[in-house]
Amino acid sequence: MGRRVAIVGIGQTLHKKRHIDRNHTELINEAARKALQDAEITIEDVDAVLNGNMDLFEGHNLMDAMTVEGSGAYMKPGLKMNTGGTTGGTMVASGWYHVASGKYDVVLIIGSEKLEESGGNTTSAIITCADPLTLRPYHTGAVGALAIVAASYMNQYRCGEEPGAIVRVKAAGNALKNPYSHLKLTLTVDDVLDSAILIWPLRLLHMCPQSSGACAIVLASEEKAKKMTKKPVWITDFVTSHMEAWRATFAPDPIPSMQSQTDSAIKLFKRNGITNPMKQVDMFEMYDPAAWAEIAWLEDFLICEKGEAWKLAEKGVTALDGAFPVNPSGGVQSTNPIGATAMIRVAEAALQIRGDAGGHQVTKNVNSALASSFGGANWTNLFLLKKNLD
Amino acid sequence: MATEQTQDLIIVPCGIHGEMNMTYRWGAGDFLSKAFEELRDNGKIYANECPQCGRYHLPPRKVCGRCHVEMDGFDKWVQVGPRGTVLVYTVTLAPFLDPETGKPRHVPYCVATIQLDGAPCALEHFLKETNPENLKVGMRVEAVLKPEAQRKGDLGDIIHFKTVQE
């Protein structure tokens, strides 16, 4: 299993539409600096620096080499990673490998995206993730794929449009309490249902925004972590699962479920003795690129029974003061600097465990949390974080 | 292009405008080539079955992603369609870019997952119908192919699926 690894420092920039007052290197530097301050160390104490970013959006390449002065990687080893939406989760996993292997004791991981520099063409870039021979002509990036998730769920359970709107209103309310979130919207269910249809049944207000921002995490070995902080958050376990990009062309389930999400949950829960996740885990920061994804994917992740997830937000189960809070940060629906997005899920889950989330700290005591990553073409990271070592 | 001045800070624009050739050449491999040839030359749609797990692949693939075993050759393929049943559909109203041309696509257009008759497998493609009042899950549709002389040997040889009454 390797050495045990803890999150000992967390830093985020504000996430917003534009950071015109700083370039990409400076944006990365702000998140890195905050994470180091949070860990009460300096860059001298860091053994390796890893960067995550989706180069295609900003139209540059080798961003890890371009941004060395911002990241602090000068004369240090490291990697640049781009695995689509999962980039931030892949970096947490990779940081874990670096430390758990025994090769390094303290690793700084930084995810960033400056989508303001992409000319608004995020969806055009995402379309290129689909297989060009069999799927690309019929795909409309993430919006098209998530519209299929929404349409399939609504067809299957005849739940109408309202549940998606209720989930979106919950996310907006949480985001208003999170100082780092991008969209600060006071929304009603009618606002969501009256918003423009992008791809039926997915509306503008169902979809995540295009954000600019960065997130950084310091990971440390058990020995170092115990000396560095009183509040380490342990990466107890995680699973990465891949699946074919062209799932829709197989004999499908009624709902085109993300099999990689279900596979991740089965493996993670089995290894950690989890038979009732809503009782045995305290909360979930899910990669929820659209309101309907939060609903359908709670079922993919085996958090609740099939056909039950659409009722959870209305009952308040997934609210900040609920029995099983989901996306207390406001989630991806409110904030989406893509190369950082999946890392923010882990960072926010860790802040909740530390009790340091601030205005959006959940009511219940958080000793354990799940965090997930989603991205093209259909793969998953699922993390289990805990306050205490098992 | 001039730089923009915003609150005393400079944003340097970079873009390639006008005509630009971005051309790629994607190899289909022998299985997809055979499938596309059958569509182009004979107007036939084929699927193939994994000999280990029994899943059908449409269009046929050489390797099953789940089992990692090699699939059987053309003599074992199953002809499917041209009729099928809509499993799920979406209607696009926002003019996103057409990945094949780089230009905004004419809206509305309807993308559906269609289970073709003949084997338990499905294809993602366009529906001719785009009026929500005439669309429903379970509706029967039929592939409309380009005239033979215009077919190129890709899935675009199917223009769309039209609604049929049975």
Image: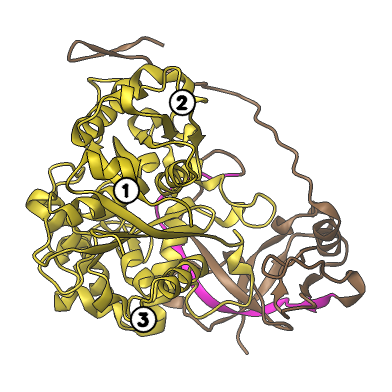
Separation of disc 2 and disc 3 at Cα? 41 Å
Residue A75 coordinates in the image, percent (x, y): 45, 17
Residue B159 found in image quarter: bottom right
Could you say which disc has been placed on residue A275 in the image? 3
Do dots 2 and 3 share one subunit?
yes
Q: Is residue A319 visible?
A: yes
The amino acid type of the residue labelled 1 equals Ala
The chain under label 2 reads A
In this picture, residue B83 sits left or right of residue A159: right
Using the image, name the chain to which the residue with label 1 belongs.
Answer: A
Q: Which chain is brown?
A: B
Tell which tag, 2 or 3, sits nearer the viewer: 3
The amino acid type of the residue labelled 2 equals Asp
- Secondary structure at badge 1 equals strand
Q: Residue at x 36, y 24 (%)?
A: A71
The chain containing the residue under callout 3 comes to: A
Whole-percent x, y for residue A276 in the image: 32, 81
For the residues bearing labels 1 and 2, Cβ distance under 8 angstroms: no
SS for dot 2: helix
Judge whether A85 appears above or below A195 on screen: above
Res. A30 image quadrant: top left
Question: Height in image: A25 above or below A319?
Answer: above
Exactly how many numbered labels are in the figure?
3
Relative horizontal placement of residue B58, taking residue B150 as reference (left or right): left
Which residue corresponds to mark 1?
A6
Region in magenta: B77-99
Which residue is denoted by mark 2 in the rendering? A64
